[in-house]
Amino acid sequence: MGKKSLEERVMEEAEFLCSAVNSEEGRPFNLHFLVNNAVCNVICTTIYGKRFDYGDETFKKLLHLFEKFLKEETGFLTQLFNAVPILLHIPGVRQKVFRGQKEFMDFVDVLIHKHMETWNPADTRDFTDAFLKEMKKGKAAEESGFNYNNLRLVTADLFGAGSETTSTTLRWAVLYMILHPEIQSKVQAEIDKVIGRERSPTMEDQVSMPYTNAVIHEVQRCGDVIPIGLPHKTYRDTELQGFFIPKGTTIITNLSSVLKDETVWEKPNEFYPEHFLNANGKFVKPEAFLPFSAGTSEGRIQLQVRGTVRGVICSFHRDSSVV
Ligand code: HEM
């Protein structure tokens, strides 16, 4: 994915974010937009090989259209059409209801086309270049998914799945630190001890910072930013906690029920970093820590079927009717 590792991109962007925060010089301001800018920029560097200045007009437009697209996706009408999809057959409705989505996708097209103009097969700058390289391999590659339409959809998917989740989690982290100054002090003490104030943190520091690591995990557990996972379909008959689930059933996971499971977590509804620390202050990760869901690999399915993780399934649907 280009020349810089993801870690370097995050570190670089974190510095821009910190100096933008510093430039407020202690005045009250809304952190939301700055954090959004920073997170979207990390996704931009991955997809387009470069970051944008926060005041850049293209970047502002991208964020504005993306925000509109998100609002539309979570709005009342979209929920209504999800529940009653037949309404989408009314002439003109799709164009009207999904206008934001179309504008965002049109803008993604513009960015991809700009990239195509400067594309050089000998120099893979980023994700878009790598995808274009695969697309050029011919019909078989195209049929296996490396086609233009998938490139624009995957791009939108990375923005959609990666930005709001991460920036909301970061804002929860700031809020919890404000609400728990004693925890904030302990985190700061560990940062000062392990990293100091002269250099940036790296992923290598993580193993030496059990308390901060526990706090970050607790932010994700309590923040619970995706309470209900995405729908998945069973590819074979299976059994889960005594329930028979036929092949082809849509499963929607209830991640909240796991992250707040009172049989696993000592204080499920409190911010308590000790959930991730053992008696010796060493970092531990309980099996029920599933903010990213359980994954779709066979191993994970076995884990759920054994019933070691309670309450993962909230509802099963088959052929649109609840079983
Ligand atoms: C704290 C941050 C994040 C959280 C809590 C989170 C959580 C999740 C969850 C719960 C799912 C659904 C899994 C399922 O039900 O199978 C998901 C899917 C996904 N996530 Fe994340 N995620 C985060 C950050 C990211 C980032 C940074 C990226 C990439 C830039 C990303 C890319 C994706 C993609 C591509 C999917 C699949 C979407 C689809 O199938 O349409 N996520 N994530």
Image (spheres, rainbow, N blue to C red):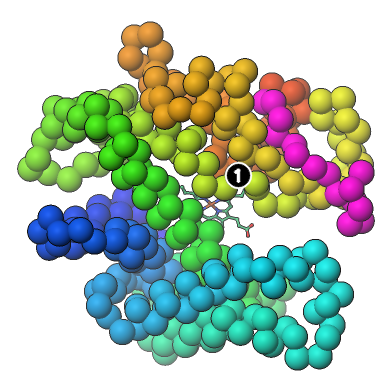
Query: Which of these two is toward me, 176 or 120?
Result: 176
Query: x, y (%) of residue 242?
Result: 87, 25
Query: Which of these two is toward me, 136 or 261?
Result: 261
Residue shown at 42%/77% (left/top)?
64
For residue 308, above or below residue 293: above
The verdict on residue 317 being magenta is yes
Q: Which residues are magenta?
A: 309-323
Residue shown at 77%/28% (left/top)?
305
In the picture, the quarter occupied by the C terminus is: top right
| The quarter of the displayed image where residue 145 is located | bottom right
Residue shown at 29%/61% (left/top)?
30
Q: How crowded is the residue under tag 1: few (<14 C-alpha within 10 Å), some, or many (20+)?
A: some
Question: Could you tell me which secondary element the residue under label 1 belongs to?
Answer: loop
In the picture, the quarter occupied by the N terminus is: bottom left
Residue shown at 69%/72% (left/top)?
77
Q: Which residue is mark 1?
A: 227
